[in-house]
Amino acid sequence: MRWALVRVCLAVTTMVVVAFAVPLGLVVKEMARDRAFSNAEREAAAIAPALSITTDRDKLERVLASAGSDTGMAVHIPASGDGTADGSGRAAVDIGRQRAADRDIATVRKLGRASTTEVAGGSTLLQPVALSSGAIAVVEVYVPEAEVTNGVGTAWAVLAAVGTALIVGSVAVADRLGVRMVRPARRLVEGAHELGEGKLGARVPEDGPTELRLAAVAFNSMADQVVQLLANERELAADLSHRLRTPLTVLRLNAASLGDGPAAEQTRAAVAQLEREVDTIIRTAREAKPQTVAAGPGAGCDAAEVVRERMEFWSALAEDEGRKWRVAGAERPVRTPVARADLAAALDALLGNVFRHTAEGTAFAVDVHNGEDAVIVLVSDAGPGIPDPEAAMARGRGSGTDGSTGLGLDIVRRLAESTGGDVRIGSSVLGGTEVRIWFQLDGREPVRKGHRGAVRRRRPRKLVSTFNRPRSLP
């Protein structure tokens, strides 16, 4: 497409330049010729008054010399009477160098109108002038070829340079336009290949021409829908597995009270096997989750909008339980490189923990901080706090012994680490727990805690200063 556009622009521009430059060059040549012969006509007209007064050779030679045209001008005066020396007539007078043929001079004298003829080295202008005696004299003005073409070569060179510049410029502009059109199309193809290879985080930047931008928007929307469908499928599997835990617990307790015997042992073994299968389903669903949140170019959502939406949902329950709540930093859009559904699930998990593990009436807050290379979401409460944050994060990795799978913290941790960020638990200024979710924006590869070679990321100064800033609830 790029080279096709360049070739079309080259052909069109060349035709336009030729269509305008060739006629303009001919006009310039004709104007130079007209200018040269106009000057010759003025020189011939300057001699006419002298011819109307006198036909004396000496006087006419002085007139030609004073006009500075004695080398390029000639005057041909016909004879009068018989042309003898006894005074009965006047002989013909020829002043200056004659270049025109005698027949051309005779023709002009007979017809009585000016004419131009080709001679060696240029052209001559033959101008008839009526004498007082009624005879017709002919003024011959020599016009050299160099004067006829004076300035034509320079004008043609300028036209050629301008035409070449126009062609080169149009080709350059067409090439840039072709790149602008081809690059988004190429990125769209690459994104489609990546998505076809199973890279669900593949996204296409929404830029370029309007049609390609709309195609990129449609592709990203389609990819988000695919990711959402897969996420819903995994969430459904994990949710159904969690729902099976309660009846499994009852079965395990009942099986333990069956006593001894082959049937009882078989029942207990079957319950244990079923419980292991349910745990496997939960772990599989959770381990597959990070593949759906890997952000690519153009992927992500507005964190402020998601926070406002989820707080609108949880605020109804907060009012029922008499909890004070506050949202800060969600007034303006905050672009986050994670899927909208994943961020909403992470917020629901943290806010659900607040409602489950704190007493009614406990206040909570959600803060959003937007920096140059990171977005931080803080969920804090005024509850009793978490005495051992490291143990809580360990439960988030599924190592808990209290019967909890730690699915909520694990969802949040994996979501943050998929962007190269992390999750930390600390004390909030409200007196309880503060969970900080760090989303990295600079596109670096995800770094998992505990992996060899993991490097702690540098925090933006402008965001660090806001972590311990005093806050007050409305």
Image (tube, grey):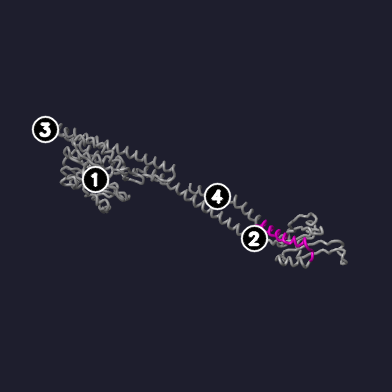
Q: Earlier in the sequence, mark 2 or mark 3?
A: 2
Q: CA distance from mark 2 to mark 3?
A: 123 Å
The magenta stretch spans which residues?
Answer: 32-56
Q: Is residue 154 visible?
A: yes
| 107 versus 355 height, above or below | below
Which residue type does callout 1 highlight?
A: Leu
- Between disc 1 and disc 4, the foreground one is 1
Query: Which secondary structure is most common in the magenta stretch?
Result: helix
- Dot 3 falls on a residue whose secondary structure is loop
Q: Is residue 34 magenta?
A: yes
Residue under circle 4?
13
In the rendered image, residue 415, in percent from the top left (x then y), is placed at 27, 44
In the rendered image, residue 22, in percent from the top left (x then y), is placed at 61, 52
Q: CA distance from mark 1 to mark 4?
A: 60 Å
Viewer-nearest residue: 306 or 221: 306
In the rendered image, residue 142, in percent from the top left (x then y), is placed at 72, 62
Viewer-nearest residue: 309 or 112: 112
Q: Is residue 296 magenta?
A: no
Residue under circle 2?
150
- When asked about the image quadrant of residue 295, the answer is top left
Which residue type does callout 3 highlight?
A: Gly
Q: Is residue 218 left or right of residue 386?
A: right
Residues at marks 1 and 3 touching, judged by CB atoms closer than 8 Å: no
Which residue type does callout 2 highlight?
A: Asn
> For residue 259, which numbered disc appears in the image?
3
Q: CA distance from mark 2 to mark 1?
A: 83 Å
> For residue 378, which numbered disc appears in the image?
1
Q: Is residue 411 left or right of residue 48?
A: left
Q: CA distance from mark 2 to mark 4?
A: 29 Å
Q: Earlier in the sequence, mark 1 or mark 3?
A: 3
- Dot 1 falls on a residue whose secondary structure is strand
